[in-house]
């Protein structure tokens, strides 16, 4: 028989509150609700996609439904994982735990179905639990219908709502729920989690690679695991995931390429620097990410120079690097909104290369009545006769 493939995020979905990644406060609050038997009839979890809202909803369902291996335990913050309730929830067919996706079932009739069924006592467990994902997608009439049940719910009913867009949930509904925010998971926590999962799957994941993936996934554990999964398919023979492989897969430039580009900029070799920009963008590198990478690389260089024992001697060069970093920082908005980001990136590379040729960049900022950028442009234009920087952008 063919074994069905289970995606990593599902295979390693946390099953107890303690295993939620990067949501310690939430786990503690829920544990306290259950241990003190102060369980509200409606919970609402909000936060960005992939941070564990529906996973938390399922864990909470287990806590509320677990009966223990001998069928005698009351609700618990440590569900056993082996009783008929826990096992049925794991397999998604517990008769009293119902999950709805409000994105596809938005109408009042769908909610009426829930309301009608909620009147009957649970079949297996002690509660009837309704998990409604993306609850903000319900229509106005659906929310109104739900409101009546939320005001006076039967004792045996619990609602668990999840949403990415809290502000779209009516105040009347919010005020009847205990609301919890799930924070984006920190890159550190994600990177550690990825290392553990890769090891369990028999792969070696470089520290650098796990950090790059964690950064790329912007707080979503699910997105991070999906990148690891794709990387595993690429390296199925060697079973070693390096940062180079991840960079290539994401269409991002490697640290080495960025360092090389920055080195050329700082040596005022704008021609070679532009050639690298052209190569990288033609290989599919996103110009905005490339721009941010140059900025980050420069920042790292400043920090390293500041920490260096020779920083007294380096003072002038640190100041120069700071000025260059400021120029990049000020252009970030232009870069974000540019119609032709490659052109703006190239112009920034030229400006930085030319500015870097000055021994004391601070001298360029002498005229107070003009903006620093304008002063630099004037100086550069006067030094390199025939080049008008303002026309480049
Ligand atoms: Zn159990």
Image (spheres, rainbow, N blue to C red):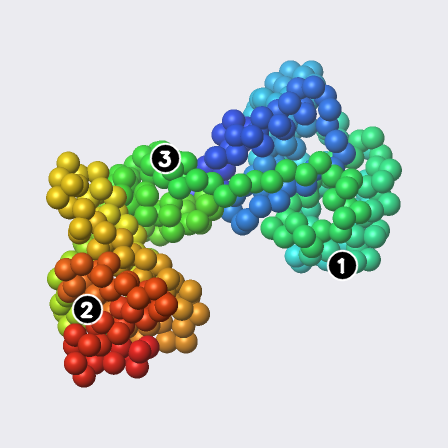
Residue identified by numbered label 1: 139
**Image coordinates for residue 268, horizontal then vertical, percent:** 15, 65
Q: Is residue 105 shown left or right of residue 188?
A: right
Where is 174 relative to 253, above or below? above
| Residue 347 visible in the picture | yes
Residue of label 3: 192
User: CB atoms at circles 3 and 1 under 8 Å apart?
Assistant: no
Circles 2 and 3: CB atoms closer than 8 Å: no
Q: Residue at x 35, y 69 (%)?
A: 370
The x and y percentages for residue 163 are 64, 48
User: Closer to us: mark 2 or mark 1?
Assistant: 2
For the residue pair 237 and 310, the one nearer the viewer reads as 310
Residue 201 visible in rendering:
no
Label 1 within 8 A of ligand 1 by Cβ: no
- Above or below, 259 against 29 in this view is below
Work out whether 279 lies above or below 43.
below
Could you tell me how far apart the alpha carbons at marks 2 and 3 are, in whole angstroms?
42 Å
Task: Using a 10 Å C-alpha cutoff, classify the residue at mark 3 as few (fewer than 14 neighbours), some (14 to 19) or many (20 or more).
Answer: some
Residue 346, quarter of picture:
bottom left
Measure the C-alpha gap from mark 3 to mark 1. Answer: 40 Å
Q: Horizontally, is 180 left or right of 314 in the view?
A: right
Residue ID for mark 2: 354
Quadrant of the image containing the N terminus: top left
Mark 3 or mark 1: which comes first in sequence? 1
Work out how far the residue at label 2 is from the one at label 1, CA to CA, in angstroms: 58 Å
């Amino acid at each position: 028989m063919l074994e069905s493939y289970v995606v990593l995020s599902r295979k390693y979905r946390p099953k107890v509150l303690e295993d939620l990644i990067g949501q310690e406060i939430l786990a503690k609050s829920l544990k306290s609700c259950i241990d003190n038997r102060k369980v509200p009839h409606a919970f609402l979890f909000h936060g960005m996609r992939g941070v564990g809202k529906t996973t938390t909803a399922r864990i909470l369902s287990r806590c509320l439904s677990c009966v223990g291996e001998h069928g005698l335990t009351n609700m618990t913050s440590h569900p056993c994982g082996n009783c008929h309730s826990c096992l049925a929830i794991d397999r998604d067919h517990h008769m009293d735990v119902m999950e709805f996706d409000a994105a596809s079932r938005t109408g009042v009739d769908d909610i009426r179905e829930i309301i009608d069924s909620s009147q009957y006592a649970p079949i297996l467990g002690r509660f009837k639990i309704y998990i409604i994902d993306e609850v903000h997608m319900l229509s106005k009439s659906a929310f109104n219908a739900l409101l009546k049940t939320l005001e006076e719910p039967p004792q045996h009913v619990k609602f668990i709502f999840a949403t990415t867009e809290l502000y779209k949930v009516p105040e009347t509904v919010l005020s009847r729920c205990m609301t919890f925010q799930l924070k984006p998971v920190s890159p550190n926590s994600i990177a550690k989690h990825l290392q553990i999962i890769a090891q369990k799957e028999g792969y070696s994941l470089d520290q650098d690679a796990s950090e790059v993936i964690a950064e790329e996934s912007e707080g979503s554990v699910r997105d991070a695991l999906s990148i690891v999964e794709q990387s595993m398919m690429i390296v199925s023979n060697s079973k070693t995931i390096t940062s180079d492989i991840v960079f290539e897969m994401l269409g991002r430039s490697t640290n080495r390429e960025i360092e090389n580009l920055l080195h050329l900029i700082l040596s005022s070799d704008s021609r070679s620097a532009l050639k690298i920009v052209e190569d990288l963008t033609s290989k599919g590198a996103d110009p905005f990410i490339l721009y941010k990478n140059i900025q980050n690389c420069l920042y790292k260089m400043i920090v390293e120079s500041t920490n260096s024992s020779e920083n007294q001697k380096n003072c002038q060069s640190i100041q120069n690097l700071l000025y260059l970093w400021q120029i990049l920082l000020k252009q970030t908005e232009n870069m974000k909104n540019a119609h032709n980001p490659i052109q703006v990136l190239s112009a920034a590379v030229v400006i930085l290369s030319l500015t870097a040729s000055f021994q004391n960049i601070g001298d360029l900022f002498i005229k107070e009545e003009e903006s620093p950028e304008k002063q630099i442009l004037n100086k550069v234009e006067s030094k390199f006769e025939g080049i008008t920087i303002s026309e480049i952008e």
